[in-house]
Amino acid sequence: MRFAEDWIRCNQIGMDQETFHRIHLQLNGLSFPNKSMVSKSVYVDIPYEYSLREYVPRKIPVSDIDETPYYYDGDTILFLPSGKKVFNDRVIRVHTPISDQEKYSNGFTFPFLKTTTPFYELRINPKNTGQCPGRCVFCHRETSYRQGSLNISPLIPVDTIIRSIIDQHGEDSLKLINHVSVITELFGCEDTFLDYIDELKTKLFRYVGVDCSFRACALDVQTKSGLKRLKNLVDDNKYSFSLESFTNRERIMSRYKGIPLENVENLLYNAREVGFDFIKLNYIAGIDSIEDFCYYIKKFKGNNLVDMLGLSVFTAFTKGQKKIRNPYAWSASYYDNLVSALAEIGISIYEPHCFDMGFPEALINKCNIVYSINP
């Protein structure tokens, strides 16, 4: 769909221009005066004028100038068809990401590090071998399975991670953490994963504040006994599962991660049975058709298998990844339709400010939004 046609449609449904451009920037990428001097992706900090929260910078593809209408010019972004500034006079900061080798060799990241609350969230990623059994076609890590092995320890010890945090940021940084999230390459083994996060929580929580919460995206845990053990480790009585998409699962993920939906449903039933009050599904918008999304999300909600979504826009960083985007997901109206369906069904959106490929704030305000703490 052409930009002009898409804007007419989005304007008719009440979408403002800034939200429209934020979505298309994620879909089409950003061009630079000298692309050869920039990596395949950048983190772009586009401040909201009236938001009570700071958002992590958005991860945006770097595109050729003939692939995107968005061009970075100094400290602003231009919309080339009109030559006008997209975000008025707001200063747009661009951060070139460090290499994955450097980023993941420590086993942790602070995604809010460039904001005024740098230690708001600690993400633990101790396993980064480049041989993830998930094998997701849409993976945005440069060091995914597509790149082969890394010269990194298969599993970084808990003590090493804690010592690295203290050495780089000081022990006081640990007291400022609001929540700890384990977001890592899949372990490929339930017991190994559970043993690790058990040790991690025990040792790390000797340093962090009493109000800090602990979460783990636990696709490795798929037995009822494992779910029971997981429930005693994570906080907020919340189970997180990386669903990613409802359709094309075996094509875009391995059998280990892209398990059939029937198996997913059984797993979520078991999560309810062992006592999880909240089920959060991590979902990437842009692969399923809107019709498929609405059908399955209503089914899951009707069966009490979902309460909230961790919602991201499918952002493609390679030509191969662009091929798996649903044709209608090139339109900003697709994402408005998806959010409208969530609002109608009554599914919440979880902490959108923490997702570096998340939805624009104005688009999701029609839904109930769940935060771990107030602004």
Image: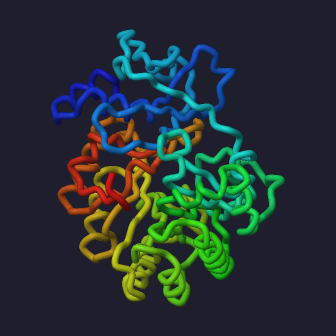
Q: Residue furthest top?
A: 83
- Asked which quadrant contains residue 334, the reply is top left
Q: Residue at x 35, y 74 (%)?
A: 278
Q: Residue furthest right?
A: 151
Whole-percent x, y for residue 92 in the image: 46, 25
Whether 34 is drawn above or below 157: the answer is above
Whole-percent x, y for residue 112 in the image: 51, 46
* Camera-side residue of 315 and 199: 199
Whole-percent x, y for residue 154 in the image: 78, 64
Q: Residue at x 34, y 40 (%)?
A: 360
Q: Is residue 236 visible?
A: yes
Whether 309 is drawn above or below 99: the answer is below
Q: Is residue 334 visible?
A: no
Q: Residue furthest front?
A: 172
- Number of disc labels: 0
Quadrant in which the N terminus appears = top left
Q: Is residue 133 left or right of residue 82?
A: right
Colouring chosen for the image of the structure? rainbow
Whether 161 is drawn above or below 22: the answer is below
Whole-percent x, y for residue 369 in the image: 29, 56
Q: Residue at x 58, y 31 (%)?
A: 95
Q: Residue at x 53, y 17 (%)?
A: 65
* Camera-side residue of 78 and 111: 111
* Camera-side residue of 199 and 350: 199
